[in-house]
Amino acid sequence: MELRHLRYFIAVAETGNLTGAAQLRLHTSQPSLSRQIRALEESVGVELLRRNARGVELTPAGRAFMDHARLALSQVDAAVEAARREGHPSKQKFALGFLTGEEMTWLPEAMHILRDELPNVDVTLSSSYSPDLADAVARGQLDLAFLRAEPGFDLTYEVVGQEPLVVLMPSDHRLASRTSVQPKDFENEPFIGVANKARVLQHVVISYLKQAGVEPAPTQLVDNPATIMSLITSTRGIALIPRYVESLMPASVVSRPLAGKVPTIDLVVGYSKVNKSPVLKLFLSRLGELVARVSSRP
């Protein structure tokens, strides 16, 4: 078994399709990828992936293998990154990641926390999906990220905020005249659901709707705020989304609060305890100050 076998397996499992994984993720041919997956299964001794009408799905053995495969690859990547940092110690580096849209709230205050260190530190910034951020932190490519508490990663999470969900809709939607929206108002409305990639948010949304006794059938499943805005405008659908996305809304989209008990989703910082960066240590020591500064902003 080689590391490439693990990378191929994870790409296929996450894509759910051999052809898509081969073309979009791995840039190889589908027959070659199929041979690599068969070789991996022969090495493990059990079936890890099963074909279905839509592509492939994990077997129970495959699901068990998936978490360990991710951890193994992340540890290898973290080891490489640690060696590179030790090999180039002239100037410290600190890599911050943000869930897309959250940097508008948290980046200015994060830089304030680091202001005294900035002359001696190269700070790099990135924004992405939450699972991708967790993966980058686990691999040592990011020192810390603002994200969701993604399961399946050997990371430490600390809650820095709780964000209420709001209802997004076209600005001229019939519900836009309401001061708040009831879950029952979703019935008979095109509902834009959350894709599997945003699994923490997906769980919060599904749990809330189930407790409210409402189970709208999603017309689309998406995980990108920009795509959600576009679909709301083009399909006149509605969506449940964390309130921070309001800062990304075009004029054609409005938000309304939910009536009654409002569901929330945690925003956390995630980092690896094996990361010995002195800048990370400083940042974590002032995390309480950071949260207080953000909370006190109007």
Image (tube, rainbow, N blue to C red):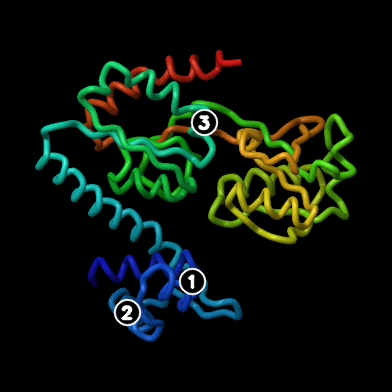
Of residues 235 and 187, the one drawn nearer to the viewer in this rendering:
235
* Residue 28 located left or right of residue 129: left
Q: Does residue 203 appear left or right of residue 176 in this picture?
A: left
Q: Are marks 1 and 3 in contact (CB under 8 Å)?
A: no
* Residue position marked by numbered label 1 in the rendering: 59
Badge nearest the viewer, 1 or 3? 3
Amino acid bearing label 1: Thr
The quarter of the displayed image where residue 54 is located: bottom right
Instruction: Indicate which disc residue 36 carries.
Output: 2
Q: Quadrant of the C terminus?
A: top right
Residue 180: image location, x then y, percent: 83, 32
Q: Which amino acid type corresponds to the residue marked 2 in the rendered image?
A: Gln
Q: In the rendered image, which quarter is residue 53 located in?
A: bottom right
Give residue 25's position: percent from left, percent from top.
40, 67
**Whether residue 108 is situated above or below residue 209 in the rendered picture:** above
Q: Where is residue 62 in the image (x, y as percent from the top left)?
A: 43, 68
Find residue 13 and report its horizontal and vertical position in percent. Answer: 45, 67
User: Do the CB atoms of the residues marked 2 and 3 lie less than 8 Å apart?
Assistant: no
- Residue beneath disc 3: 104
Other-residue count near label 2 (Cα within 10 Å), few / some / many at <14 / 14–19 / ≥20 = some
Instruction: Tell me if 183 is positioned left or right of 152 in this view.
Output: right
- Tell me which residue sits at (77%, 59%) in the image: 217
Distance CA(mark 2)–CA(mark 1): 17 Å
Q: What residue type is labelled 3?
A: Met
Q: Distance between the residues labelled 1 and 3?
A: 41 Å
Determine the residue positioned at 59% across, 29% down: 162
SS at circle 1: loop
